[in-house]
Amino acid sequence: MTEPIRVLLVDDQRLLREGLRTLLELEPDMQIVGEAENGQAALDAYEHLQPTVVLMDIRMPGMDGVEATRRLRARWQNARVIILTTFDDDEYVFEGLRAGALGYLLKDVSGAALAEAIRKVAAGGALVEPSIARKVLAEFARLAPPLRAADAGLPEPLSAREREILALLSQGLSNREIAARVSLAEGTVKNHITTILQKLGVDDRTQAALRARELGLPS
């Protein structure tokens, strides 16, 4: 049998942790291996438990979720973190993008969508809820307008097709949605995205979108 996805819950609200535990324990392929009430506790728990995926709140007493994510990724490069946030009152979400989290979801996400996000991130993918992606990228553009010319600093420039795909990726579209927009096979789009990540020097789609914004590429 396939090993279950080991999940660590990190949130300062005990009631929310209990709710998440109850919800996710209904999934046959998931196992809640631990809970933590702040970032430092999450680091300690991760070291001992080595979970597959961490569900991370942002605003917590002591060490917040952004710093915890940054330290997790620095110490354990393969750490997979999904940030659960309330976007409207969470100014730290932009730093969360840079910290290396692989998933970004609103706390009112459905149980089915949350479980699917955990599976996707556990498999090595990344997932940003489209509504968050659009808001975050729009706000990032407002707060940090590009200062460099397009493609400046890239060892190898992006092709016209790669720019087109990156622009759609930055809007939060999936590979399938991008493929439909540009009339390519989904596998071809996936290959283009792999090349784009390599050229931009980033590890996932969210970091690619942010890197594109920093370089002044259209989105």
Image (cartoon, rainbow, N blue to C red):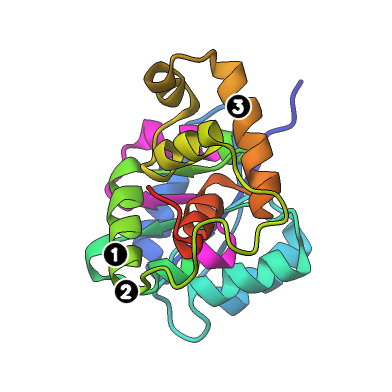
Q: Residue at x 57, y 67 (%)?
A: 99
Q: Position of residue 89 (x, y in %)?
A: 24, 70
Q: For marks 1 and 2, give the CA distance.
A: 6 Å
Q: Secondary structure at mark 1?
A: helix
> Front-most of 213 and 65?
213
Q: Amino acid at mark 1?
A: Glu
Q: Amino acid at mark 3?
A: Lys
Q: Amino acid at mark 2?
A: Leu
Residue range of the region highlighted in magenta in the rendering: 97-118
Q: For marks 3 and 2, give the CA distance.
A: 30 Å
Structural crowding at the residue carrying mark 2, measured as other residues with C-alpha within 10 Å and reported as few (<14), some (14–19) or many (≥20):
few
Q: Secondary structure at mark 3?
A: helix
Q: Residue at x 66, y 73 (%)?
A: 71
Marks 3 & 2, CB-CB < 8 Å contact: no
Residue where numbered disc 1 is placed: 139
Residue where numbered disc 2 is placed: 143
Q: Is residue 195 magenta?
A: no
Q: Quadrant of residue 34?
A: bottom right
Q: Residue at x 59, y 61 (%)?
A: 100
First in sequence: mark 3 vs mark 1: 1
Q: Secondary structure at mark 2?
A: helix
